[in-house]
């Protein structure tokens, strides 16, 4: 899906702004770019990429493109893997983000009659406040819980009659299991779940949907590009609509950097079209998906990408075999009696790599038999012999935020 004239005009405006302000992030990168010479999609695709490492290098505000007097807020990445990334927002940036988020709720069939239970974190992280801004714009009741304190979460969910749950998939599963354990399902009025922040497989999706009795929606976004709310799937289909009046999205080959034809799986690259505080040109997200060309039966004109299947930097290599988390989820999805939860330990012992896969099994399942099935399916589908370890349901750790599933202890 090539960039159109309207989008290209907006990109030119962003480039001029970055050049005129002398934004350190782009001072050298765009020094020799003539915005007026960008007349074709091919011209746009010749522009350099922006990498996450470059945002860290200009910490704290070397990505800012307007005077301090126009900045009303900052947000930040978690910084768990290095220097945090600071993103400055103007008043218009916040307004635009709010508009996109409210649009996500509307696409999910959420109205001002709903009571939206918000569990993602508030503060520097973009999640909680984004969910709340969209909720308030929609006119719904926000229940701004934030993460943690599951006892209080469930009390408020019952007492306030929450109808929509906003959460990571990991925390949604934890809440679902607690509701089941406490026998309060009949007191819960949830009807929809808006889930984001991490990829999740079909088996986990089905468990959350069944145990909470809700219709689930994938919401997409990242701190560098406003935050969550730049895309969501509709009730008609699984692929996510994204708001191409605010972002331009392309899919590239993560190895070559070449733009891929529509329909092919690759890395998502995003250019912000209207962002003022910290515009980004061809930002490599490392998220893997594909552009869906088929029109959606819901009638929305906005283009679509498929579910996020993983990240290009999430791959691990064991005994010469490339493995993505999504592949592990696919293996477990096809084995009856196995839950969605897993944990991988990769070690180097006696001169060779060993991959141990811990997974949960249903009560009454035969541990040794399930291990043999998983070993066989993994070898057939992925081509690697592993050490499978079956554990009881609920034995693997649950998280209020994102779950860490792969631990590589070789380095």
Image (tube, rainbow, N blue to C red):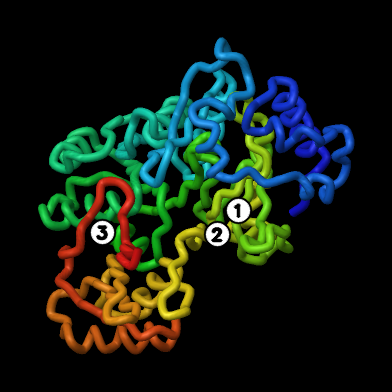
* Cα–Cα gap, marks 3 and 2: 29 Å
* Cα–Cα gap, marks 3 and 1: 32 Å
- Residue at 62% x, 41% y: name it: 243
Mark number for residue 288?
A: 2
Q: Earlier along the polypeptide chain: callout 3 or callout 1? A: 3
Answer few, some or many: residues within 10 Å of disc 2's Cα (few below 14, many 20 plus, some between 14 and 19). Answer: many
Answer few, some or many: residues within 10 Å of disc 3's Cα (few below 14, many 20 plus, some between 14 and 19). Answer: some
Is residue 395 positioned above or below 121 on the image? below
- Residue at 79% x, 45% y: name it: 44
| Residue that badge 1 annotates | 268
Residue 103 visible? The answer is no
| Residue that badge 3 annotates | 211
User: As drawn, which residue projects farthest toward the front?
Assistant: 351
Q: Tell me: 323 left or right of 166.
A: right
Is there CB contact under 8 Å for labels 3 and 1?
no
Residue 323: give x, y in percent of width and height: 45, 72
């Amino acid at each position: 899906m090539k960039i159109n004239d309207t989008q290209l005009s907006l990109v030119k405006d962003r480039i001029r702004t970055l050049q005129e302000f002398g934004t350190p992030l782009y001072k050298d990168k765009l020094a020799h770019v003539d915005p007026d010479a960008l007349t074709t999609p091919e011209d746009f695709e010749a522009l350099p990429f922006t990498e996450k490492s470059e945002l860290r290098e200009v910490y704290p505000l070397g990505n800012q493109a307007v005077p301090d007097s126009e900045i009303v807020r900052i947000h930040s990445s978690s910084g768990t893997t290095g220097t945090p990334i600071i993103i400055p927002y103007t008043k218009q940036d916040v307004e635009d983000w709010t508009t996109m988020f409210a649009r996500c709720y509307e696409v999910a069939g959420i109205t001002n009659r709903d009571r939206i239970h918000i569990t993602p974190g508030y503060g520097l992280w973009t999640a909680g406040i984004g969910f709340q801004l969209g909720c308030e714009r929609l006119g719904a009741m926000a229940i701004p819980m934030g993460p943690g304190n599951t006892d209080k979460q469930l009390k408020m969910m019952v007492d306030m009659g929450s109808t929509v749950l906003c959460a990571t998939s990991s925390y949604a599963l934890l809440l679902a299991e607690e509701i089941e354990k406490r026998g309060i399902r009949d007191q819960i009025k949830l009807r929809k779940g808006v889930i984001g922040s991490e990829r999740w497989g079909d088996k986990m999706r089905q468990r959350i949907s069944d145990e909470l009795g809700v219709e689930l929606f994938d919401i997409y976004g990242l701190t560098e590009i406003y935050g969550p709310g730049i895309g969501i799937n509709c009730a008609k289909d699984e692929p996510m609509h994204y708001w191409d009046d605010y972002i331009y999205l392309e899919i590239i080959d993560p190895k070559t950097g070449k733009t891929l034809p529509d329909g092919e799986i690759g890395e998502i690259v995003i250019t912000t079209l209207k962002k003022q505080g910290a515009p980004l040109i061809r930002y490599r997200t490392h998220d893997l998906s594909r552009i869906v060309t088929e029109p959606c039966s819901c009638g929305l004109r906005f283009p679509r990408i498929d579910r996020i299947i993983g990240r290009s930097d999430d791959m691990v290599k064991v005994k010469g075999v490339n493995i993505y988390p999504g592949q592990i989820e696919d293996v477990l999805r096809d084995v009856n009696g196995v839950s969605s939860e897993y944990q991988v330990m990769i070690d180097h012992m006696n001169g060779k790599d060993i991959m141990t896969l811990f997974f949960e099994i249903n009560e009454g399942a035969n541990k040794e038999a399930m291990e043999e099935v998983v070993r066989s399916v993994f070898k057939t589908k992925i081509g690697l012999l592993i050490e499978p370890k079956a554990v009881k349901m609920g034995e693997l750790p649950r998280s209020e935020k994102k779950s860490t599933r792969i631990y590589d202890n070789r380095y």
